[in-house]
Image (cartoon, coloured by chain):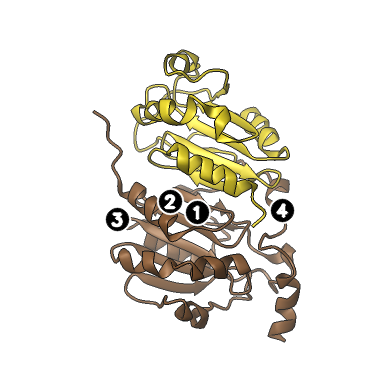
Amino acid sequence: MSHPTPDIDAALRETVSAEGVHVVHVWAPWCDNARAEHAPVWADWPRLGADSVTFVTIWSDGISGADVLAEDGVAGVREVVVPGPKPEKPDRRLTLLGLPVSWTPTTWVFNRDGLLATAFNYGEVSAAQLSGAIAGARSEW
Amino acid sequence: MRLLLALPLLLTACATAQVARTVPPSTRPILTEDTRDADRTAVEAAVAERVVAEGVHVVHFWAPWCGNSRAELEGGLYEAVEAHPDVTFSFVTIWNDAEDGADRLARYGIEASDHVFVAAQPDRGPSADRALRRTTFLGIPLTWTPTTHIYNRGGKLAYAFNYGELTPAMLTEAIANARNEWTHE
């Protein structure tokens, strides 16, 4: 198991602890499932309605996925790159913000000053699912 | 006595104290054999054993005193339970003084069976004392009731619905997505 550098965790913690609803999206540029989400979900990421969206690029030898994002039409999104190689299965998991990552794409929604509201840790999320989760995170219930 | 204990809880939303952010969980354990949580309860151990089995496993956290929990159960959670006999459902009460709420669950059409399990997660003391409530389960944060965690792939977390209320349709979709292989050619 690998762990990200503490400063990345600290930066993400600061982002999601701010008031509002914050999305952290964990992905790898080589991952077909991650790229399959780009056009339907992330190309129009401002429309999702979150107060911030952060892409966390993992398992890519520390190389930014900005080129892939541009190619897939995802523009202007903040990207944080986690250093380290692509591990072999079954060691392909890490911990970010105290949460397990065992699949890409993984998407988390935070509210209440940094608490987890929803974690999509497997498969591919739809724009409707994610928008619903963000709206749900905003509700007082 | 029971009513008196429940009263302060009823007056507040179904969230617990926001302790999670003051305890940076950067190295909190996840569900692997090399990161056993020393503080794991018997209920956590039983659920951990259950969710590593092949298939999809739903772990639902709720409290009988919580209006959001009751609304979710009234919304027809039992339909999703009945529709998925090959999925295990663990109904675990939290912040409820270790009482499992089985009677109330039965009123909502949910009873223990070969794939439905009913249990109570004890706190570190009286549940009315928020500081003593447990706010993780198998390393995943627990800061709201109702909460639903879904596991697949031999005990890996697939989905966590940690806030608000889940509809039977959302749960059914999440179970289907947890089953999907998500292959691309």
Q: How dense is the environment of label 2, judged by Cα within 10 Å: few (below 14), some, or many (20 and up)? A: few
Chain B as rendered: colour: brown
Q: Amino acid at mark 4?
A: Gln
Residue B54 tag number: 3
Give me the chain letter of mark 3: B
Numbered disc 2: secondary structure = helix
Give me the chain letter of mark 2: B
The alpha-carbon separation of the residues under discs 3 and 4 comes to 34 Å
Q: Are marks 2 and 1 in contact (CB under 8 Å)?
A: yes
Chain A as rendered: colour: yellow
Nearer-N-terminus badge (1/4): 4
Give me the chain letter of mark 1: B
Query: Which residue lies under the disc numbered 4?
Result: B18
Query: Which residue lies under the disc numbered 1?
Result: B36
For the residue pair A39 and A70, the one nearer the viewer reads as A39
Rendering coords of residue B52 (x, y %): 36, 56
Numbered disc 1: secondary structure = loop
Nearer-N-terminus badge (3/2): 2
The alpha-carbon separation of the residues under discs 2 and 1 comes to 6 Å
Give me the chain letter of mark 4: B
The alpha-carbon separation of the residues under discs 3 and 2 comes to 16 Å
Q: Residue at x 49, y 34 (%)?
A: A2
* Residue B185 falls left or right of residue A117: left
Mark 1 or 4: the one toward you: 4
Numbered disc 3: secondary structure = loop
Q: Residue at x 39, y 62 (%)?
A: B49
Mark 3 or 2: the one toward you: 3
Query: Which residue lies under the disc numbered 2?
Result: B33
